[in-house]
Image: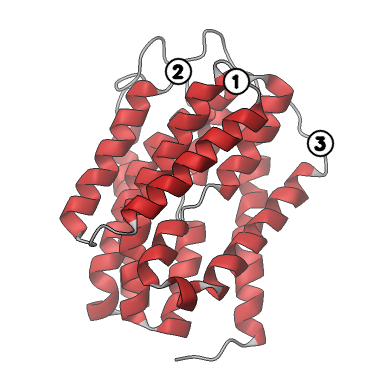
């Protein structure tokens, strides 16, 4: 195994936070739904899997990637828990309900044996169910300017997440490490600030975009889990990203309201 060096530490605390900073600034221009799509990009999970390859080996990292695939179920539980609560409660209550759902779902899924086909079917089914259950905003959800301190806070959160998951990886084991890699820290940061300043409608739009993006994320995790051990990190990541983009292109062709109720919200203003 590779020792944790200064370069590896810098990798942990730079890639994911920089990505979140770019996502945050891009979302100001293209809206809440686009922000949801962007959060589904496998930057955090890809970084964690790469680091686990170098520190724990390809087999460990492949199991973690498979866990990340099933972790989409927990992330979907978080999304629907927050959204349904937001129709009646303020963000602290919504966050508590959603986080409890995520934790309980993760604990249950950690006891489920990993298998690529059932995990992929389960992840896709969870995304579809949540898309059907998500509330629909009754009016447009414009993007409001965010405080200057919010982007640095999001970046700091990303750094803490990557450090915590990779540092605890050996103690958690590959399955639980993977299940926790889609932990909704980025989503939490976005929804609580948006909810507190603009109400629930923009949160519904954001979570809708996130759920559609999770189809692509599922494709990435499945491909990496299958290819990592026999073909190595570079090929697994390259093919995984290709699968992500391919599924993304297909899903973008679908009508936005296909799996949702009520009038659709445009992807971009």
Q: Which mark is first along the chain, 2 or 1?
A: 2
**Residue for badge 3:** 147
Residue at horizontal 27%, vertical 61%?
223
Q: Looking at the rendering, which quadrant does residue 35 occupy?
A: top right
The local secondary structure at tag 3 comes to loop
Q: Is residue 161 above or below residue 81?
A: below
Q: Distance between the residues labelled 3 and 2?
A: 27 Å
Of the numbered discs 1 and 3, the one sitting upstream in the chain is: 3
| Foreground: disc 3 or disc 2 | 2
Label number found at residue 11? none
Distance of mark 1 from mark 2, alpha carbons?
10 Å
Depth check, mark 1 against mark 3: the one in front is 1
Q: Would residue 57 appear left or right of 83 to someone viewing this image?
A: left
Residue 59 drawn at (x, y percent):
31, 79
Is residue 90 toward the left or the right of residue 80 in the image?
right
- In this orientation, does residue 245 appear? no
Examine the image and state in which quarter residue 63 appears. Answer: bottom left
- The residue that mark 1 highlights is 200
Q: Which residue is under mark 2?
A: 135
Q: How far apart are marks 1 and 3 (CA)?
A: 19 Å
Q: Which residue lies furthest to the right in this view?
A: 148
Do residues under tags 1 and 2 come within 8 Å of each other at their CB atoms? yes
Question: If you read the primary sequence from the N terminus, does the residue marked by circle 3 or circle 2 appear first?
Answer: 2
- Residue at 25 percent across and 37 percent down: it is 125
Per the image, label 1 sits on a secondary structure element best described as: helix
Report whether 203 appears left or right of 263. Answer: right
User: Pointer 3: residues within 10 angstroms few (<14), some, or many (20+)?
Assistant: few
Q: How crowded is mark 1: few (under 14 residues within 10 Å), some or many (20 or more)?
A: many
Query: Between residues 28 and 114, which one lies in front from this camera angle?
Result: 114
Image spot of residue 49 (x, y percent): 43, 69
Q: Is residue 257 above or below residue 207?
A: above
């Amino acid at each position: 195994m590779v020792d944790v060096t200064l370069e590896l530490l810098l990798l942990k605390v730079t890639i994911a936070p920089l990505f979140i900073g770019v996502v945050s600034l891009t979302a100001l221009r293209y809206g809440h739904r686009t922000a949801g799509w962007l959060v589904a990009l496998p930057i955090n999970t890809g970084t964690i899997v790469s680091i686990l390859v170098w520190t724990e080996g390809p087999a460990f990292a492949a199991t973690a990637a498979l866990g990340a695939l099933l972790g989409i179920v927990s992330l979907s539980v978080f999304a629907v828990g927050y959204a349904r609560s937001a129709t009646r409660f303020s963000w602290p209550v919504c966050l508590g309900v959603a986080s409890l759902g995520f934790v309980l779902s993760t604990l249950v899924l950690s006891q489920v044996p990993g298998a690529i086909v059932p995990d992929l079917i389960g992840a896709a089914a969870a995304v579809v169910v949540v898309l059907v259950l998500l509330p629909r905003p009754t009016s447009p959800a414009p993007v409001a300017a965010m405080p200057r301190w919010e982007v640095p806070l999001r970046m700091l959160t990303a750094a803490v997440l990557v450090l915590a998951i990779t540092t605890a990886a050996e103690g958690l084991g590959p399955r639980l490490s993977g299940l926790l890699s889609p932990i909704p820290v980025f989503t939490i940061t976005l929804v609580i600030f948006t909810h507190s300043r603009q109400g629930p409608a923009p949160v519904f739009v954001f979570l809708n975009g996130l759920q559609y993006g999770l189809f692509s994320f599922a494709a990435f995790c499945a491909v990496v889990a299958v290819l990592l051990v026999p073909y190595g990190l570079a090929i697994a990541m390259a093919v995984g990203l290709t699968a992500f983009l391919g599924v993304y292109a297909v899903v973008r062709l679908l009508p936005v309201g296909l799996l949702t109720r009520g009038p659709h919200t445009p992807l971009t203003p």
